[in-house]
Amino acid sequence: MPRYKPTDYAQTRLIPLALADQLQPGTLEYAIHYLLEERLDLSVFDQRYANDATGRAAYNPRVLLKVILLGYARGLLSSRQLERACRENVLFMALAGEQTPDHSTLATFISSVQTEVPALFTQVLLVCEQEGLLGGTHFSLDGVKLPSNAAKECSGTFADLRVKQQALQRKVQEALQQHHAADQQDESGGSAGRDPRGGDRVPLVVPARVARLQRQAERIEQFLATHEPRRGRSGREVQSNVTDNDSGKLVSAHGVVQGYNANALVAQGHQVVVYAEAFGQGGDEEHVAPMLAGAQRHLEALGRPAAWHGRQLSADTSYYSLTNLQACEQAGVDAYIPDPKFRKRDVRFAAAGRHRRSVDKHKQRYRSKRRWFGPRDFQPDRARGGLLCPAGKRLYRNGTGMVDAKGYRVSSFRSLARDCDGCELRAKCLRHPHPGATRQVRLFHGRVPGSLTAAMKAKIDTPAGRARYGQRLGIVEPVFANIRARKRMDRFTLRGRAKVNVQWQLYCLVHNLEKLAKYAPCWN
């Protein structure tokens, strides 16, 4: 029989531990410790405390930041996970100097540093500049849609929320009626509500469930009384959210999430994030201006007054809009933002169709039969002007000289309500044939010569434009892969755009610190 060495898991051992030896150069924890101790000025946090004469001693903001940044880098996003790491993980013990801040201290600190974190972000960029990691003239912009601490089922228009609140009230009343009926029947000696196997009475309704439904109904009622309907860019009402009204219902590659569109502007070279901001809208048609303005503030703090002069900006097709192109022109940046159909004009993708499956599930919705009349079904009325609908009624012009967001000339026509009411073709003409609805038709006549959209289209179609836009993939996409996949910072744990912005900037700060730990020569 073989003999093995005995193992005693009940034994205890006292191990001498030097905390400084746990922070080895070349590691992320060493970079965080060295940066916060030697390179950054954290006096901006001192004004948060007024305990110099009286009061309990506070945790040093350096210690809290070290714990939070290393915890985020390890995918520990909740304050309770960070508290546990300070008690059990040697690296966190070393960074915190064996201090053990509880979860409420950490959560309160993260939620209340909206003014200090942007200044901290700028200082880290200054260190990147000093270490030679912020070179290059090409910047790339992109975004990722991350879920937040908000309930998707609590979203809807105000009309939807009123219906939900009324349904919850009905459930509460029905549950109470069932509960009272069961009690009365039990008092009269009935058998309802008893266990069929002869046991004690089984309650039909759990009171805790009734209280929970009542709280949900009251919360929606209070929200409707204290908030206004949320409006989109077109002025129409969009869905609000009772738990976090700043968040939005966003369509991402992972499905529909209730969260924020986290944008990052990344510099070429070492992929340093120069500015980060989270938005509650899924579309990127108006995000270039605030991103350029925020990056301008950071770059000016680094001593670059003409931050965008002679520099290039690339972004994907979701940023293609007249508003974004105008923002680039005003900032003086050489932008490369293609339109959604630019690949169809690229000769390199001429044979791309042969690689597509014969039945593509993502294209099935475009192959369905048309159920409503389209613009081609409306003929011009050459005698009186306007258009003639399939029923022979006239549509009048209600807009001239219009240019849409993509630079196309547009003619708009609208029918009269009296012509649409009672029309036999109403169901095939109007998607929503409610009373008083009228048909509108817009005709496009090509882009306005010399417009920004036409100039961008011509620039992207050149070999030089395609080459410069092709650099975007290698600049900005690895940043989101590192933050979301490798670092597991794939959700927001806070509510409200101000707090989510702080957390997103901390995520990007972790990414920049990792670049310093890897490429800064004096830190290895």
Image (cartoon, rainbow, N blue to C red):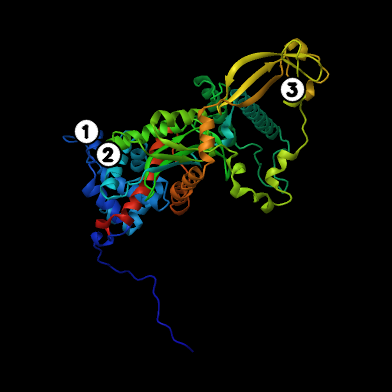
Along the line of sight, which residue is nearer the eye, 328 or 287?
328
State left or right for residue 361 relative to residue 146. right
Q: Quadrant of the C terminus?
A: bottom left
Give neighbour class at mark 1: few <14, some 14-19, many 20+ (Cα, 10 Å).
few
Q: Which residue does the image show at 22% across and 38% down from the upper left?
A: 43
Q: Which residue was labeled with disc 3?
A: 430
Q: Position of residue 21 (x, y in %)?
A: 25, 62
Along the line of sight, which residue is nearer the eye, 204 or 458?
458
Residue at the right extreme of this rendering: 424
Q: Looking at the picture, which amino acid does disc 1 mark?
A: Ala
| Front label number (1 vs 3) | 3
Query: Are the residues tagged 2 and 3 within 8 Å (C-beta)?
Result: no
Q: Which residue was labeled with disc 2?
A: 302
Q: Looking at the picture, which amino acid does disc 3 mark?
A: Leu
Q: Which residue was labeled with disc 1?
A: 50
N-terminal-most mark, 2 or 3: 2
Q: Is residue 361 visible?
A: yes
Q: Which residue does the image show at 21% across and 49% down from the upper left?
A: 38
